[in-house]
Amino acid sequence: MNKFLVAVLLCISCASFSIAQWSYNPNAVDGPQNWKEDCSTGKRQSPIDIETAKTVMDKELGTFTLVNYNKTLNKTFRATNNGHALEMGFPGRAYNVSGGGLNGVYTTVQFHFHWGANNTVGSEHIVNGKEYAAELHFVSFNTKYANLGEAVDKPDGLAVLGLLIEVGEHNNSAFSFLEVANKLVEPFSIVNDVPAFTFEHLLPDDKTKFFRYNGSLTTPTCLESVTWTVFNDHVFISQYQMNLLRRLKKNGTLAEFGNYRPVQPLNNRIVKSSFPVSEDHTSPSPSPCSVTKTVTVTVTETVTDNGTKEPTVAVDSGGASAVSMTVLLLLSTLSVALFLL
């Protein structure tokens, strides 16, 4: 028994060592173009360029059931700089995903980010050739299997929800947990006591519009065991929040290369959509801090009884907030000043 255990441990160590020898550096011998195993021989690799005009609508995909995604559970999460990405881990079978055309119930055990060196690149999936600044992956395994390790190499083992991220003007409060990145700058650093938070607002408001295809893990060994969901709508985080991710140092990969795998050939796969793509295929979710109001300022000239001319200001606030009205007052003052020139 002891000899058997030693042999198993040695095999695990060797496997971990071989898998660890990879980077995102396109000019390195361990870069994406030289990744081994399924990464180089597989026919259902990820990520891909989703060409919306070639997708096939499938009305049977239906809607997702996301258990506890809208709750703050009495748990703590584990944040890690795993040497390649920021990963947030949580207890299995606490957050579940089903519906949406998935074959079974999947339990979410972690999410992680991919990003680029600037805001024009960074997402792994791209849509009609357009790249995004980052991508968030919720990783779940099929509950028919005992754990992630048992599920990872099964054709129906994993389901990943992919979310495309852009950089906007305001901090997104749903992503405030990114502050933990300040404690994860060095590779393999860990924070074990991240307070639990809800997942609901990390995902788009409209979760009924998504793309679906069968693919792989996007890191070695690139096992082809993933049912991919890529949401149509994307969300915004601020430049400050994006920079928190870019602070993380990666093992063997320079910051200038980010941590995203180039897109792979679709081959003979079909990408399905849950909605008519002509209806909408580039919708951002509303920024949590952005509200549009129309305010009209009209300046007219009035002649007084003594013959002098005075400006009269008329304002239609359009339901603007107090902050907007403050700005409006300044604009009104400026309008009068310009009128009098």
Image (spheres, helix red, strand yellow):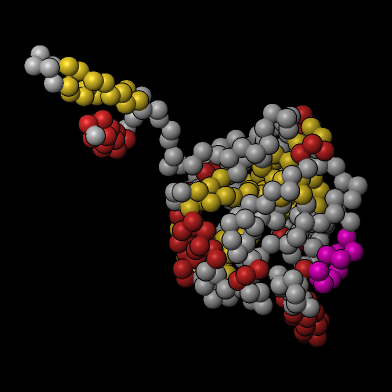
Magenta span covers which residues? 33-42
Residue at far left of view: 306
At 81% from the left and 61% from the top, the residue drawn is 223
Pick the front one: 306 or 224: 306
Locate residue 275, reporting x and y percent: 72, 31
Does the magenta portion include 151? no
Locate residue 132, reporting x and y percent: 63, 52
Magenta region, main secondary structure: helix
99 vs 296, left or right, is right
- For residue 67, say whether it is visible: no
- For residue 253, say whether it is visible: yes
Pick the front one: 60 or 173: 173
At 83% from the left and 65% from the top, the residue drawn is 39
Query: In which quadrant is the C terminus drawn?
Result: top left
Does the magenta portion include 35? yes
Q: Is residue 269 above or below residue 325?
A: below
Q: Is residue 302 above or below residue 196?
A: above
